[in-house]
Image: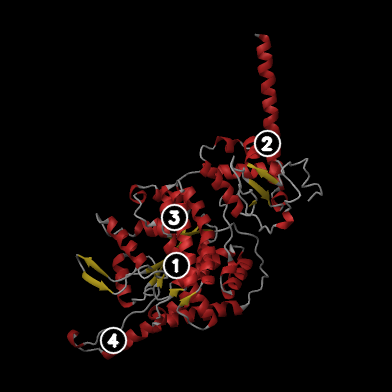
């Protein structure tokens, strides 16, 4: 970086009191990529998951955050879904998560999901093998007996189901009241096919899954197979999404009716794949340690320890949750896109689900259960939700085809690079960023700058107004790393601006000559 980087000649808004060295900037996110989203906060997860995700990423080149979030969602499917985390006397949330991994076809979402699910799949395989042996024993013991004299068959235990219908899912849940994990390799295909046997009752099966999000007892009524009472109609869901296919479904009439099915999914957009190392070392301890956590969570669920202990937030965690909910209500009211606003309305419940999931995993890693869910665990869940918020926002902007906000953000970033700003104000953007001038709402402007702050580009150093008069203009310190990491973008932006300026000059000369000829 040149020594005169902070020279007033380059930027008059560079007083000595503002020094980038005083601020700890994260590595900036690329706002010019297809999915300009922050990386997953691995530091919020137990060491076993972090180590596993980093090692898998090194050996495959795929996003470490993808491995981590898939492992997290998969482990949530092991937790007894009859458990509830109490925020208040009347507000309790189960632990299961619905997660969609967003990326284009061939970008690694299937191997990432499969790798994250391997620990739950191992337990599922053991349960089904045990059920198969019990069934074979039952058949041998009841061979030759009349139907009325036979012993009742043993329950068929399993944790993971794929390509299921509502009828088949009801049969599985009848024997597995703790709930199951639905693995849909392509969620768009799952959503499109869930009603394939429903005929005119297409909305009925969607309603069944909507109820499965909250869990609890349910009566399944079918004309052919009759009525089935289930102790707990509850599923966790994990699958992949191709954005262009989801967009087509999202804008169909039944999807656009906002029944809340899409809005119940947490979203994670896979980062672009990087170079992988075929010689990357994978420590078997990472897999073994994570499998041990999965086994412990499963054992606690089967014994009833989790559901019967009635987990509850501590008082300081409840206070933090209250602050979080009030902030979300404000954010939701200021969100112009209605579908995304509806998604944000699910966040208070989602953060409780994630908090309970993290608590169970963290306690299993420590090998000691506690029904009290503390502030630190809630803060980690809140940090993860803050990351997933930006991922959802990116996904919903693609679904709704609202690219104006994305263009504004990229234009601001281009202006920062082209003008080599160290610090700037709203006035600078008004002079040097046309989309900023053309933006009709202050909300979109503030939202774009807020995104750049969270993407590690900026630090807000706006002065606080202390007297009567005009409000101080927004003022933002620029992360020095952006000028080195995105120098090629800066050169291109400067070249484009120079060409545009030259074209304007030529146009001005042409106009002047035309007037002279008149």
Measured Cα–Cα span from mark 4 to mark 1: 44 Å
Q: Are marks 1 and 2 in contact (CB under 8 Å)?
A: no
Q: Which residue is mark 2?
A: 496
Front in this rendered view, residue 397 or 333 = 333
Circle nearer the N terminus (3, 1)? 3
Residue 390 can be seen, yes or no: yes
Circle nearer the N terminus (4, 1)? 4
Number of the front mark, 3 or 4 = 3
Task: Please name the residue shown 78% across and 44% down the image.
Answer: 7
117 left or right, relative to 190? right
Measured Cα–Cα span from mark 3 to mark 4: 57 Å
- Where disc 1 sits, the SS reads helix
- Where disc 3 sits, the SS reads helix
62 left or right, relative to 299? right
Q: Which residue is mark 1?
A: 352
The x and y percentages for residue 259 are 34, 54
Number of the front mark, 2 or 3 = 3
Measured Cα–Cα span from mark 4 to mark 2: 77 Å
The x and y percentages for residue 120 are 47, 75
Q: Are marks 4 and 1 in contact (CB under 8 Å)?
A: no
Measured Cα–Cα span from mark 3 to mark 1: 16 Å
Number of the front mark, 1 or 2 = 1
Q: Are marks 3 and 4 in contact (CB under 8 Å)?
A: no
Residue 164 can be seen, yes or no: no
The x and y percentages for residue 431 are 65, 35
Q: Which residue is mark 4?
A: 139
Figure quadrant of residue 173: bottom left
Q: Are marks 2 and 3 in contact (CB under 8 Å)?
A: no
95 left or right, relative to 456? left
Q: Which residue is mark 3?
A: 329
Measured Cα–Cα span from mark 2 to mark 3: 42 Å
């Amino acid at each position: 970086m040149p020594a005169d980087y902070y020279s007033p000649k380059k930027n008059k808004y560079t007083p000595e009191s503002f020094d980038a060295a005083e601020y700890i900037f994260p590595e900036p996110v690329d706002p010019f990529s297809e999915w300009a989203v922050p990386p997953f906060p691995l530091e919020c997860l137990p060491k076993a998951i972090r180590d596993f995700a980093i090692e898998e990423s090194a050996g495959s080149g795929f996003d470490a955050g993808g491995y981590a979030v898939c492992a997290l969602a998969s482990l949530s499917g092991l937790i007894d879904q009859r458990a509830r985390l109490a925020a208040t006397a009347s507000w309790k949330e189960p632990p299961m998560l619905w997660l969609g991994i967003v990326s284009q076809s061939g970008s690694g979402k299937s191997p990432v999901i499969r790798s994250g699910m391997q620990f739950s799949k191992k337990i599922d395989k053991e349960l089904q093998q045990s059920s198969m042996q019990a069934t074979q024993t039952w058949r041998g013991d009841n061979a030759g007996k009349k139907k009325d004299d036979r012993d009742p068959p043993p329950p068929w235990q399993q944790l993971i189901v794929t390509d299921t219908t509502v009828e088949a899912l009801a049969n599985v849940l009848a024997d597995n009241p703790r709930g199951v994990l639905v693995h849909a390799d392509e969620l768009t295909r799952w959503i499109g096919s869930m009603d394939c046997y429903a005929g005119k009752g297409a909305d009925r099966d969607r309603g069944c899954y909507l109820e499965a999000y909250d869990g609890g007892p349910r009566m399944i009524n079918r004309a052919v197979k009759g009525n089935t009472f289930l102790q707990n109609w509850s599923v966790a869901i994990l699958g992949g999404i191709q954005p262009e296919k989801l967009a087509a479904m999202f804008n169909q009439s039944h999807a656009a009716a906002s029944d809340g099915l899409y809005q119940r999914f947490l979203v994670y957009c896979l980062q672009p794949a990087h170079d992988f190392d075929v010689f990357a070392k994978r420590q078997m301890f990472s897999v073994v340690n994570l499998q041990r956590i999965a086994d412990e969570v499963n054992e606690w669920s089967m014994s009833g320890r989790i559901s019967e202990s009635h987990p509850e937030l501590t008082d300081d965690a409840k206070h933090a949750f209250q602050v979080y909910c009030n902030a979300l209500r404000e954010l939701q009211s200021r969100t112009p896109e209605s579908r995304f606003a509806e998604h944000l309305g699910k966040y208070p419940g989602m953060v409780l689900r994630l908090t309970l999931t993290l608590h169970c995993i963290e306690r299993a890693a420590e090998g000691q259960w506690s029904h009290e869910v503390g502030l630190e665990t809630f803060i980690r869940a809140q940090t993860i939700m803050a990351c997933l918020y930006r991922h959802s926002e990116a996904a919903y902007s693609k679904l709704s085809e609202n690219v104006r906000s994305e263009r504004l953000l990229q234009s601001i970033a281009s202006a920062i690079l082209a003008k080599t700003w160290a610090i700037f104000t709203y006035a600078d953007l008004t002079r040097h960023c046309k989309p900023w001038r053309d933006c009709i709402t202050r909300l979109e402007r503030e939202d774009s700058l807020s995104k750049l702050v969270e993407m590690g580009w900026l630090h807000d150093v706006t002065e606080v107004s202390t007297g009567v008069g005009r409000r101080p203009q927004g003022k933002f310190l620029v992360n020095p790393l952006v000028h080195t990491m995105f120098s090629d973008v800066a050169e291109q932006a400067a070249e484009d601006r120079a060409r545009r300026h030259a074209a304007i000059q030529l146009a001005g000369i042409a106009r002047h000559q035309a007037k002279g000829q008149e």
